[in-house]
Amino acid sequence: MTMDQAGREQLVRALAAAVIDHAEELTRLDQAIGDGDHGLNMKRGFEAVLADLPATAAKPLPDMMKAIGMTMVMKVGGASGPLVGTFFLELGKALPGEPARADLVAATAKAIAGVRARGKSETGQKTMLDVLVPVQAAFAAGGDGAALKAEAARAAEATVPMLATRGRASFLGERSIGHMDPGARSSQLMIAAAADALGG
Ligand code: ADP
Ligand code: MG
Ligand code: MG
């Protein structure tokens, strides 16, 4: 995959728009099983990322991803900032400048391993990992953009009946059941945006 500066900038703008345009929905989801700040947290982070454009997109892809990760870690409070930031940081560390598909598969696996380590979390706990892990598996299995978007939508929906055992939602115990996890939804939105920006 070769991506020039314009392509990198387009990818970042698409990721940011996906989150910012859905900030109210993310907040509503977090009001149901958390403290109601997920939309604001993610919006603040991506607004800071946008403020650094186009300079960030002038960097090679790995450095751009690391810069996004640093911004998310520094500008976003709560659980999601360090976790989403870790994803982008580790992705940047693992990616070569012009990644082939296999490189993207390997780098996303490493990025998810970073989230898991940072969050001391696993799938089945009603978190962003419940979207990231199955979508990465579909990607590794050869899925195209449309397949990954479909898997992300299915996986986010599958967090609704889950019992939360990590993050703030876990404080609710059984009352966490019946609501979509906000971080699962924001992950789905970013995956859909990336799939579209990278050409389906
Ligand atoms: P906070 O919970 O600190 O207010 P946010 O509301 O921004 O932070 O983010 C909440 C989201 O973070 C959850 O919906 C969940 O997907 C994710 N999350 C929380 N804790 C963890 C964890 N330990 N591992 C993975 N994801 C987590
Ligand atoms: Mg919250
Ligand atoms: Mg919070």
Image (cartoon, grey):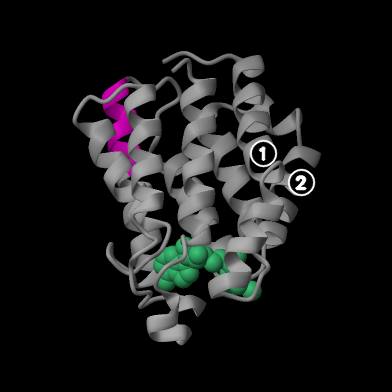
Q: Quadrant of the C terminus?
A: top left
> In this picture, is 144 found above or below 26?
above
The answer to whether the residues at label 1 and label 2 have Cβ atoms under 8 Å apart is yes
Q: Nearer the viewer, residue 128 or 120?
A: 128
> In this picture, is 140 found above or below 188?
above
Farthest residue to the right: give it: 51
Q: Is residue 106 magenta?
A: yes
- Residue under the point 56% across and 26% down: 60
Rendered image: mark on residue 16: 1
Which residue carries the number 2 mark?
A: 47
Instruction: Tell me the quarter of the picture where residue 184 sits.
Output: bottom left
Residue 151 shows in the view: yes
Rendered image: mark on residue 185: none
Amino acid type at circle 1 is Ala
Q: Nearer the viewer, residue 39 or 177?
A: 177
Q: Which residues are magenta?
A: 101-108
Amino acid type at circle 2 is Glu
- As measured in the structure, the alpha-carbon distance from the residue carrying label 1 to the one carrying label 2 is 7 Å
* Residue 84 located left or right of residue 130: right
* Residue 198 located left or right of residue 13: left
Of label 1 and label 2, which has the lower sequence position? Answer: 1
Mark 2 lies on a secondary structure that is helix
- Residue under the point 60% across and 17% down: 7
Q: Position of residue 13 (x, y in %)?
A: 68, 30
Q: Position of residue 125 (x, y in %)?
A: 32, 69
Q: Quadrant of the N terminus?
A: top left
Q: Is the CB–ligand 1 distance for label 1 below 8 Å?
A: no
- Residue under the point 66% across and 27% down: 57
> In this picture, is 83 found above or below 98?
below
Q: Position of residue 102 (x, y in %)?
A: 26, 26
Classified by dominant secondary structure, the portion drawn in magenta counts as: helix
